[in-house]
């Protein structure tokens, strides 16, 4: 039987308006006027609650197979669906084996089987010396590739230099697949660390960690990536942009048609360096959270269209790896756990700026879906798309507590922070899989292969 999902506020590609979404099987059959529900359809009337497209998070570290004690498909995807995320794209470095060839991708597929509460895909990895493995990953259906220009923290995922980047871009030429890049240079970081060591800077001070990953590391890397994107006419995507100082060169490159896209992360929009206590290693990430003026510039760049999307870079670890008792940023694992929290955390910030939910859906659903080659089916409420829907109450303010975290380890800098808006229901391909605090049915997520 068809289903009709009706609300006075449905977030369609044409904006927020009264509408009825007609679902047949797993797909959206049509988007109709509010009073045009088919008489034979099962009606779900959500009144004034917002019905928006399921979110797409293209920057998540699930860590399975091999490091399931860090996270894992089941807990990561439960956290996602509770936060209105219906599609994840997993990063290739924290699992064992790392997803740097087709054999490793098959191991990931086996590990995910029967465990995922949302749909998913996996980025392939570009590391030093694996250029000949990229065609096999392309044939196996990955939506794109990820690399690091600095040590990744994982010895098995070797960082790349300009020569490696050139070899990879040759293999990707003509495919349209994006190369996602952690854009920091080792030279700038090593120089900063050497200077701080000479000064005997306090490793527990957040200011020391911030100084150890200077803006110049991002700037140098991004300048090279712009040059390569222009030379190869290849889509390059800058992950987790932290420095606003790069915005002018990125805007200039995009204005002349260089195929480069940019994301920033929820934590760069919700936190500022001045507010991070010394020893609070739960805030450690790379590039680091910078100051409030930088945060304001990132927020404005999103509104101006100079940053394309918001992701989480959910990168959890066992609590002991955060070294909270010692409080040493240099020894703690770098990564912020946030999966499922981005919508209410960022919406609190954006609502205060007068930003509309239409922009949130673009930054957190349609733009990342496009990056992953899934725009034909994900991140939109339109006929023919998958019926991935989120029923969202945008008004209540609440304080994030450990009980609100559904990922494996209940450790996050978001605990104690004020959020705005609650996910009331999440639908995956035409079925309710989450409502308030309850999960329904069994994991039914599927891998999504790029169109």
Image (cartoon, rainbow, N blue to C red):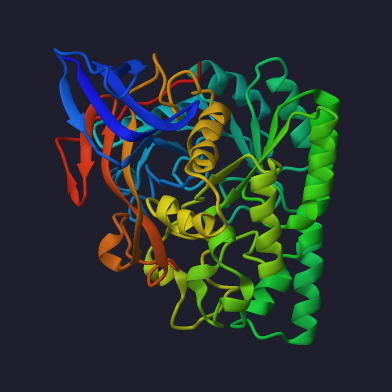
Q: Position of residue 136 (x, y in %)?
A: 55, 19
Question: Which residue is painted at 59% across and 59% down in the image?
Answer: 268
Is residue 433 positioned above or below 217 on the image? above
Residue 451 left/right relative to 235: left
Q: Position of residue 301 (x, y in %)?
A: 69, 49
Is residue 305 positioned above or below 401 on the image? above
The reply to whether residue 397 is visible in this rendering is yes
Is residue 115 positioned above or below 320 on the image? above
Question: Which residue is painted at 51% across and 40% down in the image?
Answer: 92
Question: Which residue is painted at 55% across and 27% down in the image?
Answer: 370
Residue 123 left/right relative to 222: left
Q: Position of residue 170 (x, y in %)?
A: 75, 22
Find residue 172 and report its image quarter. Answer: top right
Question: Which residue is painted at 71% across and 15% down in the image?
Answer: 174
Nearer the observer, 191 or 300: 300
The reply to whether residue 315 is visible in this rendering is no
**Quadrant for the N terminus in the image:** top left
Nearer the observer, 292 or 14: 14
Q: Position of residue 337 (x, y in %)?
A: 43, 59
Q: How many marks?
A: 0
Nearer the observer, 69 or 381: 381
Residue 362 left/right relative to 291: left
Nearer the observer, 331 or 439: 439
């Amino acid at each position: 039987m068809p289903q009709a999902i009706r609300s006075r506020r449905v977030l369609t590609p044409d904006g927020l308006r009264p509408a009825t979404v007609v679902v047949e099987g797993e797909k959206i059959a049509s988007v109709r006027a509010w009073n045009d529900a088919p008489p034979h359809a099962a009606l779900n009337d959500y009144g004034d609650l917002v019905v928006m497209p399921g979110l797409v998070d293209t920057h998540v570290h699930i860590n399975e197979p091999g490091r399931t004690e860090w996270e894992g498909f089941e807990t990561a995807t439960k956290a996602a669906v509770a936060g209105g995320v219906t599609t994840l794209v997993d990063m290739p470095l924290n699992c064992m084996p790392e997803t740097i060839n087709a054999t490793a991708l098959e191991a990931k597929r086996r590990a995910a089987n029967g465990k995922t509460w949302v749909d998913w895909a996996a980025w392939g990895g570009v590391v030093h010396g694996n250029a000949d493995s990229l065609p096999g990953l392309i044939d196996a259906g990955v939506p794109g590739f990820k690399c690091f220009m600095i040590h990744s923290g994982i010895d098995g995922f070797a960082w790349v230099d300009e020569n490696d980047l050139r070899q990879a871009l040759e293999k990707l030429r003509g495919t349209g697949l994006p190369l996602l890049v952690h854009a920091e240079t080792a030279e700038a970081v090593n120089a900063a660390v050497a200077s701080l060591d000479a000064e005997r800077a306090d490793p527990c001070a957040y200011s020391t960690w911030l100084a150890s990953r200077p803006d110049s590391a991002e700037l140098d890397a991004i300048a090279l990536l712009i040059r390569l994107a222009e030379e190869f006419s290849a889509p390059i995507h800058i992950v987790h942009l932290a420095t606003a100082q790069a915005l002018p060169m990125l805007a200039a490159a995009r204005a002349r048609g260089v195929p480069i896209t940019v994301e920033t992360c929820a934590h760069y929009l919700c936190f500022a360096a001045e507010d991070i206590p010394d020893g609070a290693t739960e805030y450690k990430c790379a590039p680091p959270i910078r100051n409030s003026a930088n945060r304001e510039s990132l927020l404005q760049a999103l509104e101006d269209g100079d940053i394309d999307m918001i992701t989480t870079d959910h990168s959890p670890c066992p609590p002991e790896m955060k070294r909270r008792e010692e409080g040493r940023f240099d020894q703690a694992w770098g990564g912020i756990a946030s999966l499922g929290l981005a919508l209410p955390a960022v919406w609190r910030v954006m609502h205060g700026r007068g930003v509309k939910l239409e922009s949130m859906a673009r930054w957190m659903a349609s733009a990342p879906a496009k990056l992953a080659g899934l725009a034909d089916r994900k991140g939109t409420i339109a006929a023919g798309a998958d019926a991935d829907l989120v029923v969202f109450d945008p008004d209540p303010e609440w304080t994030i507590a450990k009980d609100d975290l559904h990922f494996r380890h209940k450790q996050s800098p978001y605990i104690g922070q004020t959020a705005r808006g609650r996910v009331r229901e999440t639908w995956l391909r035409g079925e309710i899989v989450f409502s308030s605090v309850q999960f329904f049915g069994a994991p039914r997520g599927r891998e999504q292969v790029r169109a």
